[in-house]
Image (cartoon, coloured by chain):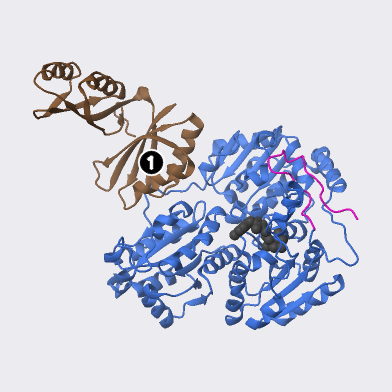
Amino acid sequence: MSENTRKMTGARAIIECLYEENVEVIFGYPGGVLLHIYDEIYKSDLKHILVRHEQAAAHAAEGYARATGKVGVCLATSGPGATNLVTGIANAYMDSIPMVALTGQVPRSMIGNDAFQEANITGITMPITKHNYLVQDAKDLPRIIKEAFHIASTGRPGPVLIDLPKDITTEEIEFSYPDEVDLKGYKPTYKGNLQQVKRAASAIEKAHQPLIYAGGGILGSNASEELLQFAEHIQTPVTTTLTGIGGFPTQHPLYVGMPGMHGTKYANYAIQECDLLIAVGARFDDRVTGKLASFAPNAKILHIDIDPAEISKNITVDIPIVGDAKNILASLYKYVKPVEKENRKEWLDRIEGWKKSYPLHYVGEQDGLKPQYIIEQIYEACKDAIIVTEVGQHQMWAAQYYKFSQPRSFITSGGLGTMGYGYPASIGAKVGKPDRVVFNIAGDGSFQMNSQEIATAVQNDIPVIVAIMNNGYLGMVRQWQELFFEKRYSHTCIRDSVDFVKLAEAYGAVGIRVEKTSEVKPALEKAMNSGKPVIIDFVVECEENVSPMVPAGAPINEILDLERKE
Amino acid sequence: MRHTLAVLVENKFGVLSRVAGLFARRGYNIDSLAVGVTEDPNISRMTLVVRGDDHVVEQVGKQLNKLIDVIRVTDLGADESVERELALIKVKSDKDTRAEIIQIVDIFRARIIDVASKSIIIEVTGDEEKIAAIEKLLKPFGIKELVRTGRIALTRGSKSS
Ligand SMILES: Cc1ncc(C[n+]2csc(CCOP(=O)(O)OP(=O)(O)O)c2C)c(N)n1
Ligand SMILES: [Mg+2]
């Protein structure tokens, strides 16, 4: 406990706690039970970004967290404000992103009486938070907020919700911020068990065809540097999952792209042929494994993860190491003898052969505008942008065709697959990293789920560039209908639903329409030079498919080419 | 396979619903659940009887451990622990049947804790088989109500769980 205590209201204490946690920005939306907190925000110099829908506050906090590595903070009022956060909290939970969500609640005396704008948000969010709190005594505020930030950001990160009854915010307390947390039931393991590290080292030395399969945990533990060094040290190819993209430089000769349903053929072949799969901060999601029984059939599985519950959850692990990826990769580096390139030649040559025979490709056309081409051009226009995406085909193309050289540069909704995530997340990312160019690669469907946030970007002067791959369809669903439902496009056509250029202009943002390949470059230049929030409506080929593709439930080496051959 | 798990939890608001919610959400089966405060009033102990193979029960344990309010989870092997359950059974009885019922109660070392003109309440402690056995024998007299605590258990010897 710090020496000097001061008397203050709960509302003021909340602000003080946020200062203590070095929070630089919160994303929020006010309401009745938050009036005292908002009054304290008004009096403080804490940065607050007013969104236009609470769902966007949660996504923006998450985008901020992913771009910066810090804890994202969002704030919403009781009842509908709190329930509007739910999708964003669930998204952060699925992708293990550190976030603290603060919600207002009706006064303690009214809880349980179906009071106006009462929702049992701790009950609702129990299965989608790492932990949550209903503050029952104003004196507990500093301890609870300290614990919340600690829980959110340590171990396997995740969202923590704190529900704040209104009368707590007016009560006076003696404020002092605790120096430490004391949680009997929460002691994450960081250092890998030495015995296990040695077992792993010996398995790695024995392997002839090892492969590293790295997930979002690489970013969560800031282990990209260690991953790069380790992969080079043992001359082992690396595949990164959707949420792991950027955790390993995508132009590195050892990189084999993304695995799974829309992964590269060579990543999937490498998984199926490897004799040791080194999983790091990845969780064997069904979109990666395809048919589980046929996944990596020849491989011993080595699994490094900070969450013991991930070990052998989906697939039986031969050598588990529980702990922090950064730590464990560094100690493996010490315990494994370096491998010379020549000694790995056979395996690396095979992979190189697959890369040459089965590269990612699309049929370029003279007139039709190809979304893959646009992504490539975005890379040409800005090689170190932060790329945020919505969910759908455009998301897969962004993952496949942009090239990443640094971590925390690809921000996407992986586990939950939330349409409408990208735009608010890109706003959060830009707030956290104002010096980076931030693109939201969007679909015409997804963008309409949170397009009201153009107002947030304009009002707060947040110059994110939205690149809509406007195919007039809920394209990813249409693709499945084309392939598996004989082109019965049931409720997936959304063509001409809105003029995105006019929509941008209505909010005071810049709107640009691009219909021809030749217009792509100038439009991107114009957008990047404008310094304003920009919406580019790329009118793309409407029935382009994401390729390659593993049909749901098939083994991942049964991966099909889908591009249209003209 | 049934496993008995001893789960020490912080005695905090909502902890029971966190545990119950976890079971519901992950599709685990609970056969019984007994909760009560321990020698330390800040800590409660839950005894869960869970059905599933070793892999499932291992997952249950790990997932429980992820709950911040859960301090420790121990799988109590049947050989190393003592298990008990308590049941209260209200049985129809009159002067014709009372003697026979009392005899059964004696054999099971159960106790009669309430006697009325048309019923008696029996308290019985033991493992599940014992309770099932006395229930079976009392059934013909007419069981009006039955309540059982669910299994509680402790490891044998000086080791604690
Ligand atoms: C909130 C939400 N609702 C529904 C879905 C199911 N879904 C997945 S992709 C998709 C289509 C996305 O369309 P669009 O944003 O236009 O992207 P495209 O696939 O056309 O690139 C839908 C409906 C989802 N992922 N999220
Ligand atoms: Mg679309």
Where is residue A462? Give x, y as percent: 62, 77
Give the mark count: 1
The residue segment tinted magenta is A544-566
Between residue A130 and residue A81, name the one nearer to us: A81
Q: Colour of chain B?
A: brown
Where is residue A317? Give x, y as percent: 60, 35
| Label 1 within 8 A of ligand 1 by Cβ | no
Where is residue A436? Give x, y as percent: 67, 72
Q: Is residue B126 visible?
A: yes
On screen, A365 above or below B104?
Answer: below
The quadrant in which the C terminus of chain A is found is: bottom right
Task: Give the image quadrant in which the ligand numbered 2 is located.
Answer: bottom right
Please indicate whether residue A509 sits to the left or right of residue B43 in the image. Answer: right
Residue A551 placement: quadrant: top right
Q: Amino acid at mark 1?
A: Arg
- Whether residue A203 appears in magenta in the rendering, the answer is no
Question: Label 1: which residue?
Answer: B72
Q: Colour of chain A?
A: blue
Q: Secondary structure of the magenta portion, mostly?
A: loop
The quadrant in which the N terminus of chain A is found is: bottom left
- Residue at point 87%, 73% (across, down): A518
Where is residue A452? Give x, y as percent: 59, 74
Residue A9 placement: quadrant: bottom left
Please indicate whether residue A244 sits to the left or right of residue B110 in the image. Answer: right
- Residue at point 63%, 74% (across, down): A434
Q: Please tell me whether mark 1 sits on a helix, a strand or a loop.
A: strand
Please indicate whether residue A152 sits to the left or right of residue A217 in the image. Answer: left
- Residue at point 58%, 54% (across, down): A416
Residue B135 placement: quadrant: top left
